[in-house]
Amino acid sequence: MPRPTAAQLAYGSATVVVSTIAMLLLSQTSTGLGVAVISAAALALGLLVALTVPIPRRRGRHAARTGSSAAAGASAAREGATGAARAPESRQATAEHPVHH
């Protein structure tokens, strides 16, 4: 099971504290059983909120993709500097292969 992120911990904890205080004030309960039920409900709500916070995507895939495109751009710049630039593709060749989305 993956570790929770800082955002998940913060949102879940804040939800537990705020919802416990709000439910205790609104219900005006003073019995031990009422406090226990409200505390359990607040804990369940905080867990639900913590699990539904979107998890950020890893940047490793992006970094690898931009790194390879940066390397390709650098090699193209070197080719252009040495005079071995590619000839542009003709319009007829691209018209023969339509792009389907």
Image (cartoon, rainbow, N blue to C red):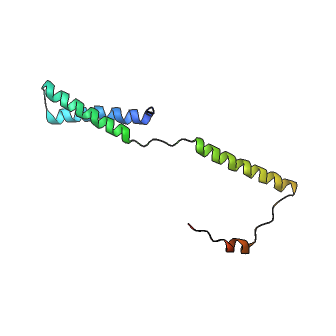
Name the foreground residue: 38 vs 14. Answer: 38
20 in relation to 69, above or below: above
Quadrant for the C terminus in the image: bottom right
> For the view shown, which residue lies furthest in the top direction?
32
Residue at point 28%, 32% (across, down): 43
Residue for point 81% across, 62% down: 86
Query: In the displayed structure, does residue 92 sit left or right of residue 14?
Result: right
- 82 on left or right of 49: right
Q: How many marks?
A: 0
* Residue 66, placed above or below residue 45: below
Taking 73 as reference, is 79 left or right?
right
Q: Nearer the viewer, residue 91 or 78?
A: 91
Picture quarter containing residue 12? top left
Q: Position of residue 58 (x, y in %)?
A: 54, 41
What is the quadrant of residue 99 in the picture? Answer: bottom right
Residue plotted at (64% across, 44% down)? 64
Residue 78 at x, y = what percent? 82, 51
Q: Residue at x 67, y 45 (%)?
A: 67
Residue 1 at what x, y percent from top left?
43, 33
The x and y percentages for residue 32 are 15, 24
User: On the picture, is 37 further left or further right than 61?
Assistant: left
